[in-house]
Every structure is written in structure tokens, then in C-alpha cells.
Image (tube, rainbow, N blue to C red):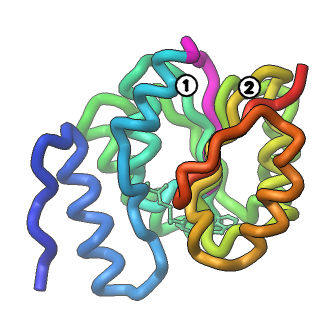
Amino acid sequence: MTPAPATNDQFGDIKTATLTHLEQHGCGCYPYSDGSLLATLTATAGAATVIELGTALGYSAAWFASTGAHVHTVDRDADHQHLARKALTGHRLANRVTFHTGEGSACLPTVAHLGADIAFFDGYPPTIAIVTALAATLRPGGLLIAGNMTLGGQAGQIRTQLATWQHTDLGETLLAVKPR
Ligand SMILES: C[S@@+](CC[C@H](N)C(=O)[O-])C[C@H]1O[C@@H](n2cnc3c(N)ncnc32)[C@H](O)[C@@H]1O
């Protein structure tokens, strides 16, 4: 059964397409639960550069890009990124997104010099190695948004590692500020 379109979500079409894709392929491309939270944090921070691990079909990238930030998004699934590019083009946001296709461990070090204002982890499962590589792309004072933190993997170790950063634990999502 095709999921019902999301209401009150300007990118609900991408979320619905992602859920349909997930249902058809069983590939784990769950769209982030609250895109407007991502955009609110990005706008509040005045973020110019966002680095994201986990493009899927572009739902979270669309919310980040809608604030005017430039998004560098990493995914090892080239089909997902192809669909994401189409979706973002449809919303006239593709010019604000740079796609990096490959493993996070290989791609993230190539963008670390950018010094992101926001880094977003939305891979599955959470692993300490990928979150550490993502955190290394942040400038001091930048915000790490770690999603999927209730889905097992190494979420507990990630929480421990980030305990010394200014942080707040929202359950599914952990927000942590990189020390200056
Ligand atoms: C939960 S989905 C991302 C959802 C997306 N952020 C959204 O809001 O629609 C996870 C995506 O991360 C990718 N992924 C997971 N682990 C990865 C890794 N280690 N390196 C690169 N891509 C990864 C998967 O291919 C998948 O497309």
C-alpha cells in the first residue's frame, strides 16, 4: 500500500516518494522524521554550509537547502542520489546541493576542509567511525545533528563520545556543538 502524502510539509512529495521506494526496495532509506526542525536549526544558526551523511531521495537535503545553505550530501547508493537530484531539481534546489557518491569513510575526509556550520548524520546503523568522520567536517562551534540514535548500532558509544560537547538529547536525535 502506498503511504499517504505528508500534510503541512512543503517537501511531502519527496517524503512520500522515499517511503514508497523503501517499501519497494527494502533499502532502509527512512526519511528523517521532522524536516522543519532541520530547517529551523539551520536558519537559526545562519548556516552557509551543511554536510550530510545519508542523502536517500533528498528529503532532508531539500529542507536544509530551502534555508539558502549549500548542502554537501554523501551516500553510497548512486540510485538514491539520482532520484534525489531529480527531486531537488523539481523543487529548484539542485543548485544548492553537491552530491558525493561513495562510502562515508571515503567521502567525508574530502569535504572536511569546508568547515561545515552543520553536520547531519542520518545513516543506518549509527557507527562511531562515521559520526567521528562527520564531526571532523565541522568548524569549531558548528552543530552536529545525529539522527537514528534510537536505532541501535553504536548510539551509546556516540553519546559517550559527545558527552563533553554542549549537547541536548532529543531521543531519536542528538544535538551537539563542537567545542571552540
Ligand atoms: C535513513 S536514509 C537517509 C534519509 C535522508 N536523510 C532523508 O531524510 O530522506 C540512509 C541513507 O544513508 C546511506 N548510507 C548509510 N550508511 C552509509 C555509509 N556508511 N556511507 C554512505 N552512505 C550511507 C544509505 O544508502 C541511505 O540512502
Residue depicted at x 51% and y 34%: 97
Displayed quadrant of residue 47: top right
Q: Contact (CB < 8 A) between labels 2 and 1? A: no
Q: Is residue 28 above or below residue 73?
A: below
Q: Name the residue nearer the viewer: 109 or 166.
A: 166
Q: Position of residue 84 (x, y in %)?
A: 40, 53
Secondary element type, mark 2: strand
Which three-letter amino acid code belongs to the residue tagged 1?
His
Residue 21, above or below 66: below
Residue 50 is inside the magenta segment: yes
**Neighbourhood count class around disc 1 (C-alpha, 10 Å): few under 14, some 14–19, many 20 upward:** many
Which residue is pictured at 65% across the width and 38% down the height?
51
Image spot of residue 129 (x, y percent): 87, 63
Query: Which residue sits furthest top?
Result: 46
- Please tell me the numbered disc located at residue 142: 2
- Position of residue 47 relative to residue 151, above or below, is above
Please tell me which residue is depicted at 44% across the width and 17% down the height of the picture: 68
Q: Label for residue 70?
A: 1
Report crowding for label 2: few under 14, some 14 to 19, many 20 or more residues within 10 A (C-alpha): many
Q: CA distance from mark 2 to mark 1?
A: 15 Å
| 123 magenta-colored | no
User: Which corner quadrant holds the C terminus?
Assistant: top right
Q: Is residue 61 above or below residue 140?
A: below
Quadrant containing ligand 1 reads bottom right
The kind of secondary structure element at disc 1 is: strand
Of the two numbered discs 2 and 1 on the same chain, state the one appearing first in sequence: 1
On screen, residue 125 versus residue 56, left or right, reads right
Q: Quadrant of the N terminus?
A: bottom left
Residue at (65%, 75%) from the top-left corner? 125
Magenta span = 45-53
Check disc 2 and give the amino acid type: Gly
Whether ligand 1 has any atom under 8 Å from the Cβ at mark 1 is answered as no
